[in-house]
Image (cartoon, rainbow, N blue to C red):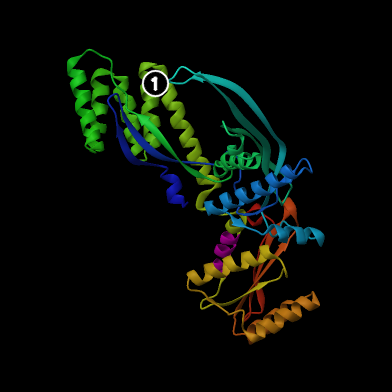
Amino acid sequence: MTHKDILKTTALLVLIFSACATTVQLRVQRPPSLNTAGIKRIAIMPFEAASPDRVYREMAQHATTVATNRIQAMNYFTLIDPSEIERLRKDNQSIENHVDALFTGRITRVNSKDSSSQGQYKNKDGETIYYTTYQRDAEIEFTYSLTRSRDGSLIGPVSKRGSDSSSSQNSGDLKSAAELLRSIVNSQLGWLGRDIAPYTAIENRTLATDKSKDKVLQAEMKNALAQVKEGNYKIALEAYLGIYERYSSFAAAENASILHETFGDTQIAANFMRQVYDETGNPRAREVLARLNKILQDQATLASEYANDRSQTERVAAFASDEIQKVLPTGARVWVYNNAAANSLADAVVDDITAAFIRKGIRVVDRQNAALIEAEQKFQMSGYVSDDDFLSIGNAAGANTIVVVGITGSGAIRRLQVRVLDIEKGVAIMQSDTGERWQL
């Protein structure tokens, strides 16, 4: 979802006609129910089981598979293999440089039971036929949440509970308890995407009808509706606005606000409905205004917290790239050096900065350059690199500018650290500060 998509959150899809009403169907962008702003890299950890019983463990495994498939299909997050998280933890290494959040779940309750009941009916010959109906009921409860890796804060949890059943006059035809439980999990995780990522909702708006007995008013409303059905929305909008102005018809006003929405003009629709409420005091106007204000609030949230789908790391890398470009000399040939060895977060920042340079036509020294490979290996072994070392190796590799990227601190005080060295002048020409704009 791009920034442009966020700002234009409504678009007309189709009109549905019936004998009673005309319904306009709209696409509306909504933020997730959980605040996942800034989270792009997640690891989906195996669901836990509250009991060692086999059925609990099987459902935990199934829930993990379903959640993984659902999240992958969203194509919104970058998924980190959970085995990598386990490896880092085993080696007592921090995970915050590798993943933004962990998705975890827990199967808290599983139950199934069989029952039967007797029944009877008379056939066409008047004979009483006795039969037995067998039924199997199953229910399951589970939770899921996300945990931010940088500070351990919990997002959620979301609690889910569902049930399903199977019945037949032949006990052998009943669905197994496991099959019923899997079906419940599939259903309950069906809306997982709406909990953790921005989504598009399809909403219906039903055009209002005026109950007035004024024949002239009714004729104008009928003509306006005909324009809507013909797809002449601009003409219909002007018609409804005129009807409201002449007759103070709230139905016309509500329809005008709906048509404003079809053009993506939610703010105009809200302003107009505020005017209508002030002029008429109609309680329905207050309801419509509340709905429009909620959409505007969602738009603001999407634009400020989910714009361009960038994670905090990507936003900081973009900011760093812009700041570096301000000081680069004319004809810069840049060596971007990762001063945080074996740090995937730093690797991602270096990749983002390098990509930004290339897009702007800035020459970047190939990191496969033999001199750079040898130098970086030596740097990693020594653990200390002086500016003179950087300048010497950079010059040998054909660079005239060096961008040294590192990461300082951890958790909530983790920051990107950037230094820019001018090889020809032999001096540092930029040093990042400790401001919030560098906070990862």
Answer above or below: position of 18 versus 145: above
Q: Quadrant of residue 379?
A: bottom right
Give yes or no for residue 138 being in the magenta stretch: no
Q: Quadrant of residue 259?
A: top left
Q: Position of residue 415 (x, y in %)?
A: 69, 58
The answer to whether 44 appears left or right of 219 in the picture is right
Q: Give yes or no for residue 319 being in the magenta stretch.
A: yes
Looking at the picture, tell me which residue is in the foreground, 345 or 173. Answer: 173
Residues drawn in magenta = 317-327
Q: Nearer the viewer, residue 114 or 429?
A: 114
The residue sitting at 81% across, 60% down in the picture is: 90
For residue 390, above or below residue 180? below
Observer-nearest of 414 and 103: 103
Instruction: Report the amino acid beneath label 1.
Output: Tyr
Vertical position of residue 340 compared to residue 212: above or below: below
Majority secondary structure of magenta residues: helix
Residue at 27% over, 25% down:
19
Q: Is residue 385 visible?
A: no
User: Regarding mark 1 in the picture, which secondary structure is present there?
Assistant: helix
How many marks can you see? Answer: 1
The residue labelled by disc 1 is 277
Q: Give the x, y percent position of residue 322.
A: 55, 63
**Left of 102 or right of it: where is 200?**
left
In the image, is residue 5 above or below residue 367?
A: above
Please state the horizontal and vertical placement of residue 333, each as a whole percent of the image.
56, 79
Q: Quadrant of residue 222?
A: top left
Q: Which residue lies furthest to the top in this view?
A: 213
Residue at x 55%, y 45% (from the top left corner): 193
Q: Position of residue 374 (x, y in %)?
A: 70, 84
Which quadrant is home to the C terminus?
bottom right
Q: How crowded is mark 1: few (under 14 residues within 10 Å), some or many (20 or more)?
A: some
